[in-house]
Image (cartoon, rainbow, N blue to C red):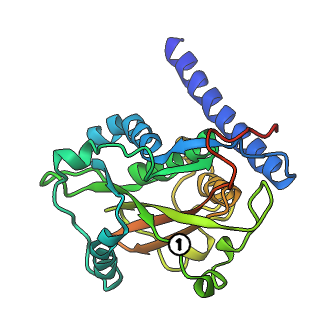
Amino acid sequence: QRHQLEVIERLTQRLGKLVNDLLFLARADSGMVKPQWQLVHLDALLMEVIEEQQLIATEKGISLYLIDIPNPDQVQGTEEKEGEMEDGQAFRPACPSQVFQNPTFDEDAFTLEGDWNQLARLFTNLVNNAVQYTPASTKTPGEAFIQVELQQLEPPSKHRARNLPFLTVTPSWGGTPRPRYLLQVKVTDSGRGISPSALPHIFDRFYRADPARPYDTAKGAGLGLAIAKTIVENHHGQIEVKSTLNQGTTFTVTIPLFRKSNIEGPVESEQV
């Protein structure tokens, strides 16, 4: 009887999560979900997300870590890594150093105005998804990995910005878009990858990349990435995905930092 109660409890929790996800999307569609604007230290938020997912990753032998790059001049090395993945070569970073596993927070470099709860939900979905679909490591340490990379980018030129729709929106508080800089988060895993035919639909609601896989509510109902996209759009950002079968997947979230000219302290929250 105790086992049956435990099963019922798990099912209740999963159904509760499904209802919560559906309500979030329904409210977003109707315009009822408005970000509660405040100053968010994105590096601290990502460390919390990683700490929450670390136990599951460790049990599977997956190396999960954060790298932060506050200086835009250091982006070149990252671009070279991307090129290797695009050419079909597996990206296998060296085992992260202690400083990368426990980066020093910079209160200004990674601070944006956003909704802490929504952003935490966004990156929890992405990291948890990577943990679930990255096979457990059975060989050398670091073979299975999930790398969360946070970097600050300079805003593009005015001409290039016109070709990027997510940089031409009007901020929620009104006024002219004036991004001070961009914050970019990449979640890269060494998982099984996503087939090219599935990539165009990966953010669709209830879409599952492998329809042949038995339905498992423990791994969600196919709403996590749809919610992630909605949250990114709420923050006037963009989310992209690149994947190579049997090598891994990278989700890239780019959020422009819009600053009110008269803001010096925390941003006033909007009521839902």
Residue 56, located in which quarter of the rendered image? Answer: top left
Q: How many numbered callouts?
A: 1
Whether residue 186 is visible, yes or no, is: yes
In percent of width and height, residue 245 lies at: 38, 74
**Position of 178 relative to 200 (above/below):** above
In percent of width and height, residue 187 lies at: 41, 59
Residue for point 42% across, 49% down: 132
Residue 204, located in which quarter of the rendered image? Answer: bottom right
Q: Residue furthest top?
A: 1
Residue for point 21% across, 63% down: 93
Residue type for callout 1: Pro
Which residue position holds label 1? 155
Q: Nearer the viewer, residue 219 or 260?
A: 260
Residue for point 82% across, 46% down: 27
Q: Residue furthest right?
A: 30
**The C terminus lies in which quarter of the figure?**
top right
Whether residue 120 is visible, yes or no, is: no
Q: Is residue 66 left or right of residue 36?
A: left
Q: Nearer the viewer, residue 91 or 133?
A: 91
Q: Is residue 242 left or right of residue 75?
A: right
**Position of 89 relative to 121 (above/below):** below
In percent of width and height, residue 123 lies at: 51, 49
- Where disc 1 sits, the SS reads loop
Q: Give neighbour class at mark 1: few <14, some 14-19, many 20+ (Cα, 10 Å).
A: some
Q: Residue furthest left?
A: 140
**The N terminus lies in which quarter of the figure?**
top right
